[in-house]
Amino acid sequence: MHVESELYSALLAAGVSQEKAERVADALSKTIDQRYMAHAAVLATKADIESLRSDVFKALTDQTWKLAGVVLAGMGFVVAVLKLTP
């Protein structure tokens, strides 16, 4: 609350009443908190992005192995059918 206390002190030094200076400092503090919370809800941290990157990599790896399995199974089926046909 350094900024708010500096503003409070400056307002008092400028001749603003203590009550009004407190209200201004409190209003500023609340506004800063509201903006911080709004940004915190929207922004991703480095840890969030790293976690997402890890999840995407795992999903792509799993999908690649599944696709490779389907292709190999299909090829095996085609080979088996070709062996059974005269």
Image: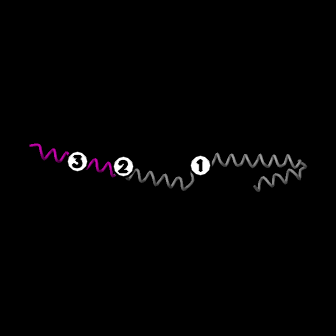
Q: Nearer the viewer, residue 17 or 70?
A: 17
Mark 3 lies on a secondary structure that is helix
Residue at screen point 25% across, 50% down: 72
Q: Residue at x 85, y 53 (%)?
A: 10
Residue 23 placement (x, y as % from top left): 81, 46
Quarter of the rendering occupied by the N terminus: bottom right
Residue at mark 1: 43
Discs 1, 3 touching: Cβ within 8 Å:
no
Measure how far apart labels 2 and 3 are at the Cα level: 18 Å
Identify the amino acid type marked 2.
Gln
> Residue at the spot x=13%, y=47% of the render?
83
In the rendered image, the residue lying farthest to the right is 15
- Image check: 80 left or right of 29? left
- The residue lying toward the viewer, choosing from 15 and 20, is 20
Part of the protein shown in magenta: 65-86
Residue 36: % across, % down = 67, 49
Mark 1 neighbour density, 10 Å: few (under 14) some (14–19) many (20 or more)? few
Amino acid on which disc 3 is placed = Met
**Mark 2, other Cα within 10 Å: few <14 / some 14–19 / many ≥20:** few
The residue at 50%/54% (across/down) is 51
Q: Earlier in the sequence, mark 2 or mark 3?
A: 2
Q: Is residue 9 above or below residue 82?
A: below
Q: Which residue is mark 3?
A: 75
Regarding mark 2 in the picture, which secondary structure is present there? Answer: helix
Q: Amino acid at mark 1?
A: Leu
Q: Position of residue 17 (x, y in %)?
A: 89, 48
- The numbered dot on residue 63 is 2
Q: How is the image coloured?
A: one colour
Total label count? Answer: 3
Residue 77 falls inside the magenta stretch = yes
**Which of the marked residues, 1 or 3, is nearer the chain's N terminus?**
1
**Magenta region includes residue 17:** no
